[in-house]
Image (spheres, grey):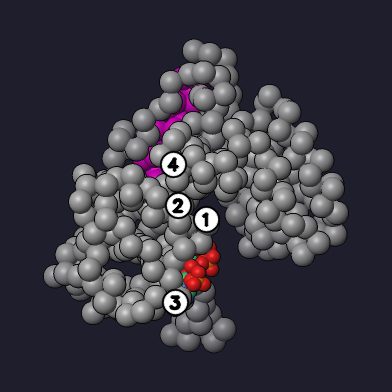
Amino acid sequence: MTARIIDGKAFADRLRAQIAGKVAELKTRHGITPGLAVVLVGDDPASSVYVRSKAKQTVEAGMASFEHRLAASAPEADLLALIAKLNADPAVNGILVQLPLPAQINSERVLEAISPEKDVDGFHVVNAGLLATGQEAIVPCTPLGCLMLLRDTLGDLSGLEAVVVGRSNIVGKPMAQLLLQQSCTVTIAHSKSRDLPGICRRADILVAAVGRPEMIKGDWIKPGAAVIDVGINRVPAPEKGPDKHKLVGDVDFASASAVAGAITPVPGGVGPMTIACLLANTLTATCRTNGLPEPSLLEEAA
Ligand code: NDP
């Protein structure tokens, strides 16, 4: 079998176009422009690239983008004061603090300081609790993107066996909650799980969010399964030349794509969905704050 490639880039392009249409409608009908504030502390090159890319896509969607940069040495109190200001600013509908933060700053305290209504990353305990109890939450962007790809690929997920490898608060746990909401039978595996290959082989849906390059092999995969590879790992690529690198996922794409029914590539799978879902969350937060009906992006972008 050769797996169908789940094209996350194409789906994300459609989703962003759809969001831009909804934003234009909000502006003309209600005079509202959604605003996303992104806060970067320090000058980590990878984080700077992410922040630039987020700002660019925010503006392309017709939203207002507010970028705030603090020095790497900034005290936690300065960041908390900025968040308090953004919480109170009616032009800001979403606040994202780029992680990781420098060592002198407590990330948990910072994330909890963001108003849950503006927490477009969905990392606040209030949003995690709402998601876990099946209430209206802001859902973390990466798992939300994975769910959209799965719904687009498989349609109804009800009754399917889903295995999520990884139990982080930002990917694994919310992914499992979303699959449970879709009436999957969900197993969460992690570094202490016994017989990981055997657990994975049960999965109709396998989501890998581990951070270990190409760990999941083709013979761990049930024939025909849908495989979502969240991992982004930078590894040496001597075939491209000395000191060259490439990105690979947590799944060994070559062997897995010979067994799976559908699979996301890395790059070009889950990655592009994450920023698109950040925009989707900003739009959702704007509609909720203004008491407007929420766009049904999941169905329409499919
Ligand atoms: P974390 O490091 O927070 O979590 C990794 C999880 O994998 C942990 O639960 C850990 O288990 C588990 N794990 C580690 N080693 C093994 C192993 N050998 N067998 C089974 N489980 C294992 O990572 P994140 O969740 O933040 O990210 C996971 C991956 O996804 C990374 O590659 C990251 O770069 C990528 N990512 C991609 C995004 C995107 O936009 N595409 C967004 C976010 C992340 P335990 O809890 O027991 O330690």
Structural distance between the alpha carbons of marks 4 and 2: 11 Å
**The CB of the residue at mark 1 lies under 8 Å from ligand 1:** yes
Q: Describe residue 276's horizontal placement relative to residue 86 as left or right.
A: left
Residue flagged by tag 4: what amino acid is it? Thr
Please say if the residues under marks 1 and 4 sit with CB atoms less than 8 Å apart: no
Assign the magenta stretch its main secondary structure: helix
**The CB of the residue at mark 4 lies under 8 Å from ligand 1:** no
- Give neighbour class at mark 3: few <14, some 14-19, many 20+ (Cα, 10 Å): few
Please say if the residues under marks 1 and 2 sit with CB atoms less than 8 Å apart: yes
Residue beneath disc 1? 170
Q: Is residue 244 visible?
A: yes
Structural distance between the alpha carbons of marks 3 and 4: 26 Å
Please say if the residues under marks 3 and 4 sit with CB atoms less than 8 Å apart: no
Residue beneath disc 3? 192
Name which residue lies at 20% across and 70% down: 222
Is 71 in the magenta? no
Residue beneath disc 4? 133
Q: Is residue 232 visible?
A: no
- Give neighbour class at mark 2: few <14, some 14-19, many 20+ (Cα, 10 Å): many
Residue flagged by tag 2: what amino acid is it? Pro
- Residue range (magenta): 10-28
Return the residue nearer the eye: 299 or 26.
299
Residue beneath disc 2? 174
Look at the numbered disc 4 and give the secondary structure of its residue.
loop
Look at the numbered disc 2 and give the secondary structure of its residue.
helix
Q: How many marks?
A: 4
Look at the numbered disc 1 and give the secondary structure of its residue.
loop
Q: Describe residue 70's horizontal placement relative to residue 6 as left or right.
A: right
Structural distance between the alpha carbons of marks 1 and 2: 7 Å
Structural distance between the alpha carbons of marks 1 and 4: 17 Å
Look at the numbered disc 3 and give the secondary structure of its residue.
loop
Figure check: 54 above or below 269: above
